[in-house]
Image: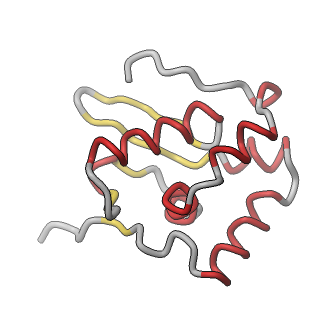
């Protein structure tokens, strides 16, 4: 993950973004991150192996949908909502509305908070 490439806003490509958003699990990750909060990868729960989740997070990052930051051994991810809205106005809102209406990606959750 070191030195991960994050495309600049003007480099975001609609076909790349749409391809990244073509998977229900990745839509679920976008839904979860849409609140604007940076999340540690360890907080994310999906019905797949950790290696598969890591692959999906990489696809989103490489397309410019998310930004990943490493701090020591931990990785954090945020949705690039402002960049996406600037480049493709209304896309994220439409995606979130449709995903919510159809329940797409609803099986992605946050890990329970430690007590």
Report the residue at 67% width, 25% height from top: 7
* Side (left or right) of 8 relative to 79: right
* Side (left or right) of 40 relative to 65: left
**Residue 83 figure quarter:** top right
Report the residue at 64% width, 81% height from top: 102
In the foreground, 60 or 35: 60
Outermost residue to the top: 3
* Side (left or right) of 20 relative to 114: right
Describe the colour scheme in one phrase.
secondary structure
In the foreground, 77 or 53: 53
Position of residue 53 measured from the top left corner of the image (x, y, whole percent): 37, 48
Quadrant location of the N terminus?
top left
In the foreground, 10 or 14: 14
Position of residue 78 measured from the top left corner of the image (x, y, whole percent): 52, 46
62 versus 57 height, above or below: above
In the foreground, 53 or 11: 53
């Amino acid at each position: 993950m070191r030195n991960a490439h994050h495309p600049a806003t003007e480099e975001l490509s609609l076909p790349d973004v749409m391809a990244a958003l073509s998977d229900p699990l990745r839509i679920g990750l976008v839904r979860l991150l849409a609140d604007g909060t940076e999340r540690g990868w360890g907080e994310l729960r999906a019905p797949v192996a950790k290696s598969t989740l890591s692959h999906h997070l990489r696809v989103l990052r490489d397309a410019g949908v998310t930004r990943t930051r490493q701090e020591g051994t931990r990785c954090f991810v945020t949705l690039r909502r402002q960049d996406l809205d600037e480049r493709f106005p209304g896309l994220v809102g439409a995606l979130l509305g449709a995903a919510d209406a159809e329940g797409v990606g609803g099986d992605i959750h946050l890990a329970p908070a430690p007590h």
